[in-house]
Amino acid sequence: MKKFQHLLEPRSVAVVGVSDDAVRPGSQAVRALIKNGYAGTIYPVNPKYPEFEGLKCYAAVADIPTAIDLVVIGVPAQGVLPVLEQCAAKKVPYVVVLSGGFRESGPEGIEREDRMMEIARAAGIRIIGPNCLGFANIHSNVYAAFGSITRAPKLQKGSVSLVTQSGGFGYSIALACAEAGIGFRHVIATGNETDVDTVELIDALIDDEATSCIVAYIEGSRDGRRLLEVGRRALAAGKPVLLWKGGVTEQGARAAASHTASMTGTYDFYKALFKQTGIIEIQELHETVDYLKALLPGKYPAGRGAAVMGVSGGSAIVFADAGERVGVNMCELAPATQERLVKVVPNIGAVHNPIDLTAGYFSPANQEKLAEAVRAVLADPGADSLCVNLATTGKAGSLAAAEVLGRVAKETDRPIVVFSSAPASEIGDALAHFAQAGIPVLPSPSRAARALGVLAGYREMRAKLGAAAAPLDTGSVELTNELKQLAAQGALSETQSKSILSRAGVPVSKDVVVQSVDGSVFERMSAPLVVKIVSRDIPHKTEIGGVKIGIRTRAALEQAIAEVLDNAKARAPHAAIEGVMVSEMVRGGFELIAGVVNDEVFGPVVVVGAGGIYTEILRDTSCRIAPFGESTAREMLDELNCRRILDGVRGGPALDVAAAANSLAALSQFAWAGRDVVQEVDVNPIFVLPQGAVAVDALIILRDAPSAAAH
Amino acid sequence: MKKFQHLLEPRSVAVVGVSDDAVRPGSQAVRALIKNGYAGTIYPVNPKYPEFEGLKCYAAVADIPTAIDLVVIGVPAQGVLPVLEQCAAKKVPYVVVLSGGFRESGPEGIEREDRMMEIARAAGIRIIGPNCLGFANIHSNVYAAFGSITRAPKLQKGSVSLVTQSGGFGYSIALACAEAGIGFRHVIATGNETDVDTVELIDALIDDEATSCIVAYIEGSRDGRRLLEVGRRALAAGKPVLLWKGGVTEQGARAAASHTASMTGTYDFYKALFKQTGIIEIQELHETVDYLKALLPGKYPAGRGAAVMGVSGGSAIVFADAGERVGVNMCELAPATQERLVKVVPNIGAVHNPIDLTAGYFSPANQEKLAEAVRAVLADPGADSLCVNLATTGKAGSLAAAEVLGRVAKETDRPIVVFSSAPASEIGDALAHFAQAGIPVLPSPSRAARALGVLAGYREMRAKLGAAAAPLDTGSVELTNELKQLAAQGALSETQSKSILSRAGVPVSKDVVVQSVDGSVFERMSAPLVVKIVSRDIPHKTEIGGVKIGIRTRAALEQAIAEVLDNAKARAPHAAIEGVMVSEMVRGGFELIAGVVNDEVFGPVVVVGAGGIYTEILRDTSCRIAPFGESTAREMLDELNCRRILDGVRGGPALDVAAAANSLAALSQFAWAGRDVVQEVDVNPIFVLPQGAVAVDALIILRDAPSAAAH
């Protein structure tokens, strides 16, 4: 770990704000450093004390004779800035501000926080906090922290690092993991994240050799795009990131606003990000524990087939129920596997999946048989993973099983998980054995199934990484330049928008605007045609007779143009008429809507949904962060409830999903290339046809255009 | 508890199949009875032993000198029937058959199980099992059981009773609860349920004074209707039933089939049953624990508003997120409440909901302030419940909070729940205090929110009970008799079906079948009309020109009738023509489909869904077990994704939801009244109009009718 090396592994720590009052954050930090055996130098700072806890106490940071890697500030808010100025003078690289009284506490605090950042930026100081619990490096006994992080029970060493905006709640994650025997590397509570934020820390932790899994709790992020990049980097590095996003519902976001006023971002965009990075979403403490247990051994199933064996039929059913919901499938066992099993499973049991070993099977006497049964299953081509249901099996049986499974696990790359509901007080020996063998023990068969689902999903994301990494054609420079010129002239028209999208690779229907009764365009277009009056002053064109459809001859076209012009004159005499649009009529297929939102936090995001009447009724949409390729676009379409319409309904032809996906991918690449100028794109509708897809109406709204002002 | 009194509280127990082999089920049962201090008489039975475990051992049940309440049979399968015959001779009322080797093991076992029931029925013996772990009455130390039920840890006494088809998995539920400090009354593992089943036991447990909550795990039920009745009786009695249905997915059901071959029933029908009874569905061990913790104190919130206070902003956000998903709403606190809070909450905290008490607030010094804060919130009209987030608060702070909350909880009917993530080893004193005060402590804020959601939902179901109990008009006897007569004549036509449904209260569109070109019906109908050829031999009527729509005059009607007859003659010359149907054309509104399935397990169930193209695409349906009234029918409609279409879309009028609901209720009452004859009803479509609803096509399929044979 290079970045933040001397923050998280400081050779010396000064703590400002120690006192006889044991509850003072500074006092807690110094005591924790001493109690936990921190090997570097500790400098307590308080002008009132000659020494603190047996250490020489300094009057000020400025008085400390040597260089300091890290200063921990725990003085009341109004005292923080003078200390920070001393740190700046002393060229301290890292500061943790435990103190509250900043942005979260009103106008005065906001001003203080701004001033703090000015000092820090000028001096090149990186700050954790303010308003945070601080951090602990469990491997090196660094406790630049107070509160729960410094209290019993002490976390054990391990390879999980935790970064959390919320100290109080975030440390609950650490405690829940600790209770389940999971050890930690770094635990970092970031508070207001005025400078260093969760995303930057995750980024740094990817490069920390001692960290194998990263858990984060965030309420909001300033830069969703950066999280996307960091998530992908973590995936490439094979370090799973488990992320809990707080404030995902309306009332959750309201509660978050009253908590730290951090930007919570749109949950839909976070969900898209999870799918595009392999970041594993967590929403429960026990989920975090389960998934970490499953991930830490580092064994991933090659597919989604699972075999289940055990002494409880009910457990297998519960596994199967939960498995189906997360795509973990009860595999068929090959005849050869069943032949091997028949020899070691009692004949009142079952040798198909789920394998019923029959009550009492787990016992010292049956160890060889069990080993053969497990080996047989793990040799089966369909059994990508194995769940062994010990269920209520007691002390001796559990230990017998643990010994066998521990042995066999060494011979295989396939993950084995165990369900046991026996109390730890009864089967402690077996649990220790399982832990040593890297076999996760889950407290219900459904949780075992979900943990296997997470492993399978993570492996799939890793496999997809190669495909996603292919360079995307992110639009031409010329197109972006043209957009910038247009932006200077004001809002884009629909015609301009369609022309630009067409050149960006989104197929559009052909439109020609004529100024008079001119049927010559008929020769250049495919009938049937539609004519429509073009005027910003006529919002409801059909009502004034401004639209004619189903035009099949040149003569009819001329008549239609004449009629809509006449109608407009007669029924909207004051409207400024820009012309008459002649368009090819799109028939058949299925209407989708597509669009781009250039989000403040995530940048351009592409949304697709069921169109027409479905749009309003079904709210059936999916989104991905731009840019992306066709395979991601197909995933978006696959998520829609209306997806099966595209395969053809009531005997109709299948529609061109590939064309729709290509259009979305092109749209995403256009949006990414034009992110500095494009605020929003609405493509509504885009028809998916039996062959091809075509956008009929489209509007690009530019960032600086007057029409974008409303946003 | 009267029913099964001497099964669950036997004065004497004979155990057949004891031996020196300690793993024999019978041996385990006798040892468990002795070890746990069973106060009745124990009769071990085995001809080979003069005594067993210091008790006189009998050669056979027949040799036991006194009457016996309960015989536990643990001999191998082939020995069970002779023992049962002795029980019959001795007029033993209850037998538990622990032995496997029955239905679950193939043809021979099925025959054995049938013979077993013959003996039992003839003698009036009630049987638990076979192929089961047996049961334990924890209050009276009755252990008619083996395996996990008899092993350490011993369950503590409490008021939860557990009934489970699966012994191995079901006892996992007991162990998970025990670990969380929940005590038990009865634990019954029913195995094959050849005689006594889970539903009958739940029914009996409702009348057990020592049982306050019932937990059940079932894979299938022979009689869903009985479960409905029992569920409603439990609701009326105020005894929550928590039910885990195993085998709810396709692969779960397959796994269940290989387990006990019990009928799993349709999960959708079970879900309807849960909604109609207030039975609380559980799908996880920890859910069971959480909900029991919340239910056992017997305090229910009067509404869905919740206040949250604590020392961790993140915890409040997580509570709010989870709460929104289960309808637990962060309440607004009244100004008066906030004024009280301002006096006892530090000014860097927050006195709106969520209330931020600020770090370190929970402490012995703050007890009076905390008491005032809690009292202020509980006096607020919007705070139907309170969640106190201790989060990582340590030993002293947790105990201080527990003392205050325990005191204040006595003064209020509103439920208080606590979130604590501190390890039990640290805060044991506080946990004991909370337990004594009946304050549930949940391990995450989200689980606290969901537990409050369960409490709120249960109270609402209890309130609805009164409404649902109103007697329903379940159809006339004449209509049912008429159906029976029609059934004798064969399948019903659409016209007959519509006529019957109309009389049952389902509005239908008017149809008249004419045999010739007869325009006189025009006077009796509202134009526009539709004509349609009637012939069983012409499946696709439109294709042969057999349908004409939009008829507005008598002359046009006569012409249309003539045309469809001509077209049929010309283009389907061999078809038998039954006439021409003249119908009123229904326009506007929204198409639903409705139907009845007369299920083997649940009886008649009404299904409603989005109609037209939506039917196939969206699979948007909801169902309820018949009969039911309008309010239940409205709930069904409210569950549909397309529900908001009924409120009017794109400026269209709102549709008549009440009429649609009335139609469904009438359909349900018809289906219930006619359950002996009606196999299926398809109403497709039924239009919901701005005023009224009308079924356009309908078909009643009778149970004995030839057309029902395909089902």
Image: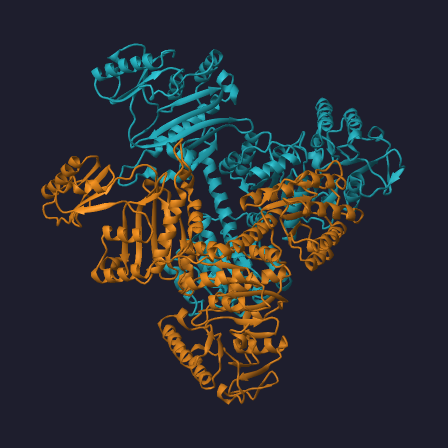
Chain colours: A cyan, B orange
Left or right relative to B645: residue A711: right
Q: Which residue is found at the position 60% from the left and 36% from the top?
A: A254
A296 and B694: which is toward the camera: B694
Q: How many marks are shown on the rendered structure?
A: 0
Q: Which residue is found at the position 49% from the left and 48% from the top?
A: A453
Toward which corner of the image does residue B334 lie, by quadrant?
top right
Can see residue A676?
A: no
Toward which corner of the image does residue B491 lie, by quadrant?
bottom left
Q: Residue A268's spot in the image, x, y percent?
A: 51, 35
Q: Quadrant of the N terminus of chain A?
A: top right
Q: Is residue A222 above or below residue B570?
A: above
Name the residue furthest front: B523
Q: Residue B391's spot in the image, x, y percent?
A: 68, 47
Q: Residue A401's spot in the image, x, y percent?
A: 54, 63
Left or right relative to B6: residue A208: right
Q: Is residue B156 above or below residue A470?
A: below
Can see residue A629?
A: yes
Left or right relative to A613: residue A653: left
Q: Residue A493's spot in the image, x, y percent?
A: 41, 16
Name the residue furthest top: A516
Left or right relative to B137: residue B226: left
Q: Which residue is found at the position 38% from the left and 75% from the top?
A: B114
A241 and A323: which is toward the camera: A323
Q: Which residue is found at the position 30% from the left and 59% from the top?
A: B479
A189 and A53: which is toward the camera: A189
